[in-house]
Image: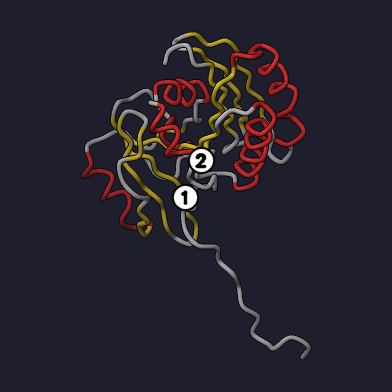
Amino acid sequence: MTSRAVLAIELSTPRGHVALVRGADVLLEEAFVSERSHNSMLYEPLGRALEVAGDALSLVVVGLGPGSYTGVRISIAAAQGLGLSRSVPVIGLPSIGFLSDEADYIAVGDARRGQFYTTRINEHRQLDAIKLLPSEETSSWLSQQNLPAFTSDSVPPLPGVLCAKPSAISLAKLAAELGEETVWTLTERPLEPCYVQEAFITKSKKPLGT
């Protein structure tokens, strides 16, 4: 499995990150910062990664967030296009599993509307479903976990939480270690952004047309 060349695309935060790895070797790594133009800035580093990979590319992995809905959608579309054109499998993994090299930590972020999301990460894998907590309860809950806490938010949502950006290198290296059966299982799952909660829709107070 170490000979597998894996391309990772991570756009769940304003820092876009593209990496190509084979085993322990990082063949290419490029990062860029963009608030709203990931689509225009992604394709040059992506083209360079494909040039380096040549015919050795065997897997594409994309970070699914939570984070920028638009960024994740762009990376999913790009990954699916590559998968079709290169006839290689495409899988998605939660971006928050790659905030740190710590073996065990809590991922936390602002879920808005007075809530924070939390989940436990172990060896880059999400151990449980995302949990939503009221803002006034989150600090107390975190203090009981006795684990470091990281966020991909631009600013720490709570005291003691460390800001970090998801790593496309770590994303690619973990994907390279997956067995063929696991990769196959993941390709059967729909590629969708990690949703923290259902979309909030404000209903009109007046009937339309009045």
Q: Nearer the viewer, residue 188 or 150?
A: 188
Q: Amino acid at mark 1?
A: Asp
Mark 1: secondary structure: strand
Kindly indicate the quadrant of the structure image that contains residue 48. Answer: top right
Mark 2: secondary structure: loop
Kindly identify the residue that appears in the image at 60 percent across and 26 percent down. Answer: 17
Kindly identify the residue that appears in the image at 63 percent across and 44 percent down. Answer: 73
Kindly identify the residue that appears in the image at 59 percent across and 70 percent down. Answer: 201
Q: CA distance from mark 2 to mark 1?
A: 7 Å
Rendered view: 3 above or below 156: above
Q: Nearer the viewer, residue 5 or 67?
A: 5
Instruction: Give the crowd class for mark 1: few <14, some 14-19, many >=20 residues within 10 Å.
Output: many
Q: Which mark is residue 153?
A: 2
Marks 2 & 1, CB-CB < 8 Å contact: yes
Across and down, in percent, residue 74 comes to 67, 40
Left or right: 121 with respect to 59?
left
Between discs 2 and 1, the one toward the N terminus: 1
Q: Nearer the viewer, residue 194 or 175?
A: 175
Q: Amino acid at mark 2?
A: Asp
Disc 1: which residue:
110
Q: Which mark is residue 21?
A: none
Left or right: 162 with respect to 28?
left
Across and down, in percent, residue 171 comes to 47, 26
Q: Nearer the viewer, residue 201 or 169?
A: 169
Rendered view: 207 above or below 108: below
